Structure formats: C-alpha cells, structure tokens
C-alpha cells in the first residue's frame, strides 16, 4: 500500500483524523533536496497520537522491513507491532530515525533488527 491508505499505520484508526507525518524532519534536508521532504518516500499516515510519538523521537520507530513498528508505551517495554499499511519510506529516512531515537535499549540499527 502507499501513503494514500485510509488508516493509521500503527493502530488502524481511519479518516478523517489521519495526519501525514514526515519521517525525516525538513530541517534535516539539504536545501537542494528539500523537495524530498514532502515526497511519498518520507510520509506515513498516522493518527494524531502516533504522529506526536514519532515527532518526539521516542516511543515509535518504523522497522526497516516496513511491516512493523517498535512502540514503547509509557511505563512499559519496547513492543513490535505489525503495521496496518506498508509505506514507501526510504531506508535512509528510517535509519535517520533509528539514530535519533530515545527508546530505551535501542542504540543502533542492529538493535532494531533484533526486535523487529
């Protein structure tokens, strides 16, 4: 599926509450590549709660297989969840998020692979 899917990739919540979330923030793109910021390769549909979790660089990561997310609800451990959609996100943007995360126990790309 593409980003045009009609539900949150994490919880399955449907329109009209969905938001287009950017995996890699605009400030992290070179000016010459800023057009890539709004491309389908950097967007995932999320409900407002999961969008906030993604933007705060904690509690939510997209797995490199693009079939699962890692989520860390407050007060609990990291869990892998199957995604409701399969976004087109570039692996380099997923790697960026992994390197920026605040999720406990996630320090590298290989840590994510071992959980996903």
Image (tube, rainbow, N blue to C red):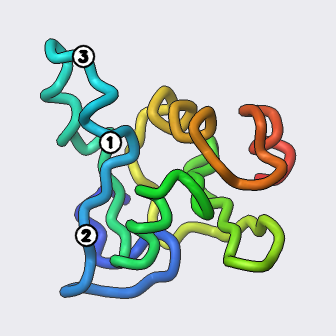
Q: Quadrant of residue 31?
A: top left
Q: Is residue 30 left or right of residue 12?
A: left
Residue at screen point 57% across, 38% down = 100
Residue carrying label 1: 42
- Give percent across and percent down for residue 106: 77, 45
* Mark nearer the N terminus (2 vs 1): 2
Q: Quadrant of residue 93?
A: top left
Q: Is residue 73 left or right of residue 95?
A: right
Assign a secondary structure to mark 1. Answer: helix
Residue at screen point 31% across, 49% down = 22
Assign a secondary structure to mark 3. Answer: loop
* Mark nearer the N terminus (3 vs 2): 2
Assign a secondary structure to mark 2. Answer: strand
Residue at screen point 24% across, 16% down = 30
Residue at screen point 45% across, 72% down = 50
The quarter of the image holding the N terminus is bottom left
Q: Residues within 10 Å of mark 3 (few under 14, many from 20)?
A: few
Query: Would you say the residues marked 3 and 2 are in contact, meaning their CB atoms lie under 8 Å apart?
Result: no
* Mark nearer the N terminus (3 vs 1): 3
Q: Say above or below: 85 vs 111.
A: below
Q: Is residue 12 left or right of residue 37?
A: right
The label on residue 7 is none
Residue carrying label 2: 19
- Give percent across and percent down for residue 79: 77, 68
Q: Of 108 and 64, which appears nearest the observer? A: 108
Q: Say above or below: 15 vs 107.
A: below
Q: Tell which residue pokes out farthest to the top in this image.
A: 32
> Label 3 to label 1, Cα distance in Å?
14 Å
Q: Nearer the viewer, mark 3 or mark 2?
A: 3
Residue carrying label 3: 30
């Amino acid at each position: 599926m593409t980003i045009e899917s009609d539900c949150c990739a994490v919880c399955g919540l449907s329109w009209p509450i969905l938001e287009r979330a950017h995996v890699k923030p605009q400030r992290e793109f070179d000016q010459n590549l800023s057009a890539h910021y709004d491309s389908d390769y950097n967007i995932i549909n999320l409900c407002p709660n999961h969008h906030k979790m993604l933007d705060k660089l904690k509690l939510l990561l997209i797995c490199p297989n693009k079939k699962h997310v890692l989520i860390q609800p407050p007060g609990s451990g990291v869990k892998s969840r199957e995604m409701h959609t399969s976004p087109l996100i570039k692996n380099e943007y997923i790697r960026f998020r992994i390197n920026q995360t605040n999720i406990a126990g996630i320090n590298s790309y290989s840590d994510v692979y071992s959980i996903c």
